[in-house]
Image (cartoon, rainbow, N blue to C red):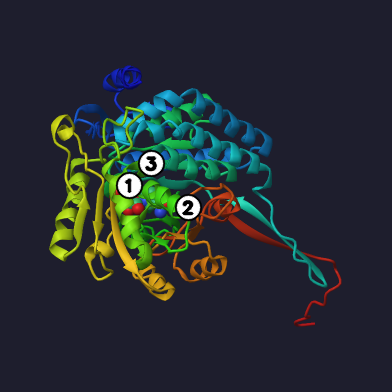
Amino acid sequence: MLKENQKKLQKVIKSLKSKGVQNIIDGKELASSSKEVFENHSPVDGSFISKVAKGNSKDIDKAARSSAKAFESWKNLDHKSRRNVLYNIAEEIEKNADEIAVSESFDTGQPIRFTKKAAIRGAANFRYFADKCIDAANGLSTPDTHHLNFTMRQPIGPVGVITPWNAPFMLSTWKIAPALAAGCTVVHKPAEFSPVTANILSRAAHKAGLPSGVWNTVHGFGESAGKALTEHDNIKAIAFVGETTTGSHIMRQGATTLKRVHFELGGKNPVIVFDDADLDRALDAVIFMKYSLNGERCTSSSRLILHDKVYTKFLNKLKKRVANIKVGNPLDPKTEVGPLIHPSHQEKVLSYAALAKEEGAKVLVGGTAPKGKLSKGCYVNPTLVEGVTPKMRLGQEEVFGPFLSVMRFKTEKQAIKIANSVRYGLTAYIWTNDTSKAHRVARDVEAGMVWINSQNVRHLPTPFGGVKYSGIGRDGGEYSFDFYMETKNICVAYGTHPIPKLGA
Ligand code: NAD
């Protein structure tokens, strides 16, 4: 299976090496206006993948103008035609499932056991929003005695979508599908560390019949291409997924043009395991929610808050399982944890293992880079640290790797206090068989999304987003339309109301 995947990858690499990764503006693959490129390397072994167009403000301007022009017809397209295009995109994505999986694994280091589902999930996002095209413009009717008020939703205009490197394909579909369903046009700026699948996706959309200019892709760095996108006057809103500090920059950059923003930012999510929980299921979920997707997952539970009574027993089992996680080539279906995105990120994650020792916590498992044949890649052995407290940097900062910090509690109040002791508030996971307690903790924990007795299982109509420094706004289902659309109120008189007569 590894060999088969490597074979598939060779085909992709060959074409990437000859063509490079270009911008896609107005349906055409173009070099950057400056002809500048940057190099993209694989985290698997540091090997060169391709040259990538280094987009700049001129390229963004061209893409934004193209989106503004295309908006005039796309927003007026009847919902059936729009729905059909979105359905076709879903089909095209599925046709490219193998290429997407191997490219995403080699470009990001994410194990193929997860990336092989990327196309299925991406297609599901498009199908879900295709079915919602018919309702996108719906509003409310609010009649008064003399007037009928009703609202309708209209697309806000061309929007900018800026995505991170951790799950680039899936996150791009998640943002772009609702924008298109709403009638918006899009300029997408993919992350510079993982540019490859953005073009597979855009090409699939154009092949599926999406008109030119409705979806433009400009590659490049955040400080240049990304910044220009957030500052462009034609762009009415920015959907951003990435780091909290980048979110602050974007807010400042977009202030002059009054950008509407939707931010999905960092997290330091708690998983609270009470002594009365189903501990076997909790153990599986704790491990999955930290070590899947290399731990480079915004919703991962990076702080295990463990009840005193079950602490030792649970931790012993956890240690064994973490030490047994299979680290390896992400193209190997047996691999559970692959290399991290970039040498700089590998270094950052490893630095937290050193910090654990400095801060008085104890590294129980991992904290090192594997030796031998994996040493060329950006690998970090799955890491487990105990004795972490909220006062430590380790208890506060997002590590964004296969790195779990364990904390101990005795009372429900203490558990909630620890859970809320960070500036983030994206997700929380609660394990208990006491229904009332589960509800109390879910109510009091500061998070945008809470799962009780479950790992993160995403249901597309539900609101997705965080509180505090984890984000602004929600997407998913109808919530996406609140962001990508304006609500207009129309007031119609029945002809019975008095009109004040000035100067009569
Ligand atoms: P990042 O903020 O460094 O980069 C994200 C994107 O922003 C990239 O495309 C980058 O080029 C661009 N960018 C950087 N500076 C910019 C600027 N000044 N103006 C405009 N664009 C700019 O994030 P990352 O390192 O790629 O991703 C990891 C982070 O993403 C983690 O913090 C993680 O928690 C977060 N994340 C959050 C969610 C969520 O749903 N909350 C999901 C996935 C990832």
Q: To which residue does mark 3 refer?
A: 167
Name the mark on residue 236.
2
Viewer-side label of 1, 2: 1
Q: Earlier in the sequence, mark 1 or mark 2?
A: 2
Residue at 32%, 51% in the rendered image: 318
Q: Earlier in the sequence, mark 3 or mark 2?
A: 3
Name the quadrant of the N terminus.
top left
**Residue type for callout 1:** Gly
**Residue type for callout 2:** Lys
User: What is the quadrant of residue 20 in the picture?
Assistant: top left
Viewer-side label of 3, 1: 1
Q: To which residue does mark 1 refer?
A: 295
**Residue type for callout 3:** Ala
Judge by depth and name the residue closer to the eye, 145 or 475: 475
Judge by depth and name the residue closer to the eye, 326 or 36: 326
Q: Earlier in the sequence, mark 3 or mark 1?
A: 3
Quick check: marks 3 and 1 in contact, CB under 8 Å? no
Q: Position of residue 411 (x, y in %)?
A: 40, 74
Q: How many marks?
A: 3
